Amino acid sequence: MTVMVDGLHPAASELRLVKVLAALADPARLAMVRTLARNGESPCTQLQDAAGLTIGKSTFSHHQKVLREAGVIQARIQGQQRILTVRRDDLDACFPGLFEVVLDAPEKLIGTKRSD
């Protein structure tokens, strides 16, 4: 059973490589994480557009949940908005160097764009 620190996010000690990699394996989730890493944080209502995703709201919410439950992102409430951030410090502490590789990988290696 995963220990959730606030009922929503796993504790840093509960992060598991298989869950993190599985969460990052989907192109839409990877685009979300790369956008958050580049921008620092984003209201969830703006992240979908910022990441260039053309998916439905329920699918977008599902992707947020997968990333949150894997420990890749964190959501905090600010007024009526949910602000999303990458758990960079926790990921770097648990998996040194992994996040940099994910962020720096060229699109052709990720598989989200065709290579000519």
Image: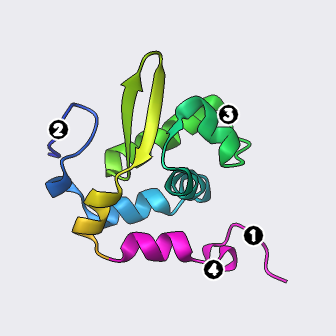
The type of residue carrying mark 2 is Val
Q: Which residues are magenta?
A: 97-116
- The residue beneath circle 3 is 56
**In the image, what residue occupies the spot 51% across and 54% down?**
33
Q: CA distance from mark 3 to mark 4?
A: 26 Å
The type of residue carrying mark 1 is Lys
- The residue beneath circle 4 is 109
Residue placed furthest toward the right? 116
- The residue beneath circle 2 is 5
Q: Nearer the viewer, mark 1 or mark 2?
A: 2
**In the image, what residue occupies the spot 48% across and 22% down?**
81
Q: Which of the two labelled residues, at mark 2 and mark 4, occupies the earlier sequence position?
A: 2
**Pick the front one: 13 or 92:** 92
The correct choice, above or below, for 6 with respect to 13 in the image is above
Q: Nearer the viewer, mark 3 or mark 2?
A: 2
**In the image, what residue occupies the spot 41% across and 69% down?**
99
Residue placed furthest toward the front? 40
- The residue beneath circle 1 is 113
Magenta stretch holds residue 108: yes
